[in-house]
Every structure is written in structure tokens, then in C-alpha cells.
Amino acid sequence: MMETQRLILRPWRDTDAEAMFKYASDPDIGPIAGWPPYTSIENSIEIIRTVFAAPETYAVVLKETGEPVGSCGIMFSNSLHTADMKQSEAEIGYWIGKPYWGQGLIPEAVGALLSRCFDDLALDAVWCGYYEGNTKSKRVCEKSGFKFHHTNNDIVSPLGDKRTEHFYIMTREDYHSERSEQTVHGTGV
């Protein structure tokens, strides 16, 4: 479990299925990230027990309400991922329910995941990718301090269509340099 100013990041529970379905069934959420909208609460329970049971996968829970409103996680080179990663690297993924777009909650969650990646797991680099047209995800990458690395064309998404995917990266050095600058400039970490 991790905690930020407004969020608790914790493992998903079966009891979260209704909240997950409420947000992940929205056709504006999954398809832009390459996955189909969830079809039922039962479908959500199945996702919780399989996909979201992976290590380092977290429900994004609002402290204020206790409701899970999105998901984030760290995927390693031995799991389903899209970045071409080395053993000492990982990829961060995330989504959040539409009512919470534009509030900076996912960058807040990503900050906690980056701390986990570099401070606890001692990774060398972390990747983040998004499909062409997903401007909100691009903004999260940039706001979180990732740097553009490369673009792959004609990537087959989990939905089976071909897409352009943009990859961003943050190295351990970038992460520690950014944190040092924040501390020097008094913005905190």
C-alpha cells in the first residue's frame, strides 16, 4: 500500500468490482488505452482476480471517499507489456474514471509508483507509453517528468487494431536529479 496527499494505492479487492465497473465500462476509458469497456460487475471481478491480481497493481482510491476511481501499476519485463524493457526496467500503466480527469490524480499516483520503482525496487529505468490520440496520457507522461524516447508504428493493440504508440522513459538518474531540483527549489517531493 502507498499513500499520497489525496490517494491510497492498494491492491484491488472483489468488493471493488462495482466501483470498477462504474468507471471502466465507459467507452471513453478503455478503448483509447487498447482494452474493451468492462461489460458487467462479474467481468470486473474476473479482471480483479486475474489481470489486477498481478504484483504491483493498485486500485487508485480517493482518501476523501474510500472509493476506487482508477488503477495504476508497475509491469516488469516478464509480464504483458509494450515497451522493450531490460530486466532492471519496468513500465507504468494507469487509467482513471472520467469524472476525475484533469484533477492531477494520476500524476500523483505515478509519483508514488516512481518512488516505489527507484527507491524501493532499485530499477534503472521506467517506461510509460500511450497510443496516438490519447492526449491525456501524454500529459501524464510529461507532467510526471518522463522524456520522449521513440515511436513505434503499426503496433497491434490488445483490441486487435494497428496503432502508433509513443514511448517515454525516466532513468534513475533523471528521477534523482528531478527530486534534487525540487528539494533545492523548495517545492518538496
Image: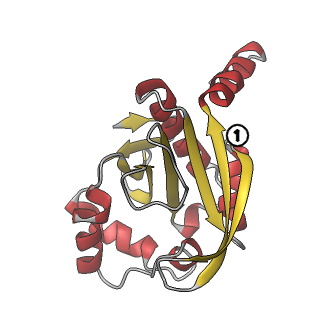
The quarter of the picture where residue 137 lies is bottom right
Q: Look at the image and tell me in which quarter the N terminus lies.
A: top left
Identity of the residue drawn at 54% across and 32% down: 124
Left/right of residue 54 with respect to residue 128 in the rendered view? left
- Can see residue 182? yes
- Count the labels in the image: 1
Q: Position of residue 82 (x, y in %)?
A: 52, 62
The quarter of the picture where residue 147 lies is top right
Identity of the residue drawn at 37% across and 50% down: 58
The quarter of the picture where residue 189 lies is top right
Of residues 19 and 39, the one drawn nearer to the viewer in this rendering = 39
Identity of the residue drawn at 40% across and 62% down: 80
Q: How many other residues sit within 10 Å of disc 1, few (<14), some (14-19) or many (≥20)? A: some
Left/right of residue 114 with respect to residue 139 in the rendered view? left
Q: Which residue is mark 1?
A: 145
Q: Position of residue 130 (x, y in %)?
A: 63, 63
SS class of the residue under badge 1? Answer: loop
Left/right of residue 36 with respect to residue 170 in the rendered view? left
Residue with the most extreme top position: 184
Q: Position of residue 45 (x, y in %)?
A: 24, 70
Q: Position of residue 2 (x, y in %)?
A: 39, 36
Colour scheme: secondary structure
- Can see residue 102? no
Name the residue type under label 1.
Gly
Identity of the residue drawn at 44% across and 46% down: 64
In the image, is residue 47 above or below residue 54? below
Residue with the most extreme right position: 185
